Each structure stands twice: as structure tokens, then as C-alpha cells.
Amino acid sequence: MAIFATWSYYPEQMQTPAPQQLTIQFQDNTDCDLAKQTCTTQFTDLQVQVTLPQQPIYLKPFASTVRASGNSSAAIMIVRVHFVMLNMQMPTPVTILQATPSAVDSERSWQGNTILPVCVSGRHDWRVIIELESATTQYRVQQGLSMGGKT
């Protein structure tokens, strides 16, 4: 007994969903140093507050907290944090923060442990990139983080 199977491929009949384009809103708030204070950034429909409850130490996990309030806060699905340095090409880890319960109904909160990499050149002038993403918009905030030392 022989069994034969045939398969037909008709690419012109396949429906591929169009990729969803994200609108990116960017705020540069590098004048605010997360090593020294809580930093708040205002978008048209969203306010973002970033806190590092303890002083970051290189290569040791430390807490990061992001709070969002405003008309678009309920639509935020994912929050990411990563560290970059201007004019440096080095890979840095990206941390996805976890949603946490908030005491205020109009506010959403995310927390996670991030790790600050070490720059082999001895520089200490980090930029913290916080990305909050909904189905249609990515809110990107750039904060400062100075650890003292050489810049």
C-alpha cells in the first residue's frame, strides 16, 4: 500500500498582515541624574517617573522603578531599561521590567533589577534609556546617570 501526499503553494493567495508601525515619541532628560534623584518626564499624554531606590553599583543587580500616569498609561504593555554611553560601541543588557500593583488607580508601575555594566575605558557617564510601549506608540526617555570618576 503506497500513500502519496501533495502540497500546493500559492504565494499570491497568502494574506500577510501589514506590520504595525509604532509612533516613537522621544524626550531627552539627561539633565536629570538618576544617581542623585527621581527623574520625571512629561509627554503630551503620559508622565513618566523613574527612580533608582539605591545607588547603582557596577555589575551588581539594583532595583529600577518606572511609574506612568496620564491618558495613555493604561495602554502601556512593556517597559524596558538599558544603559548606553555616548560615542561608545558596546553591548549592554536590556531589562524588561515587571508590572507591579500601584496605590493610585490612574498610575501604573513597573519594577525590575538591572545591572550597570563596566566601561573598560573608565568612563562613568551613562545614559539610561527607558522605553514604554503600547500597541501603537513607543515612549522613549533618555536620562542621565553619573557615577563620578572620569567623563
Image (cartoon, helix red, strand yellow):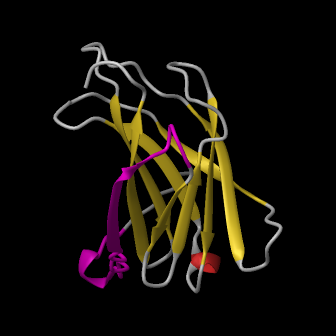
User: Quick check: is 123 in the magenta stretch?
Assistant: no
Camera-side residue: 37 or 100?
37
Q: Position of residue 147 (x, y in %)?
A: 42, 27
Relative side of 42 to 86, left or right: right
4 over 59 or under it: above or below: below
Q: Residue at x 36, y 82 (%)?
A: 15
Relative side of 124 to 34, left or right: left
Q: In the picture, which quadrant includes the C terminus?
A: top left
Q: Position of residue 38 (x, y in %)?
A: 56, 52
23 over 5 or under it: above or below: below
Choose top left, top right, bottom left or bottom right for residue 103: bottom right
Q: Residue at x 49, y 47 (%)?
A: 81
Q: Which residues are magenta?
A: 8-37
140 over 53 or under it: above or below: below
Camera-side residue: 55 or 90?
55
Choose top left, top right, bottom left or bottom right for residue 138: bottom left
Q: Position of residue 2 (x, y in %)?
A: 52, 52
User: Quick check: is 29 in the magenta stretch?
Assistant: yes
21 over 117 or under it: above or below: below
Q: Position of residue 43 (x, y in %)?
A: 43, 77
Camera-side residue: 75 or 108?
108
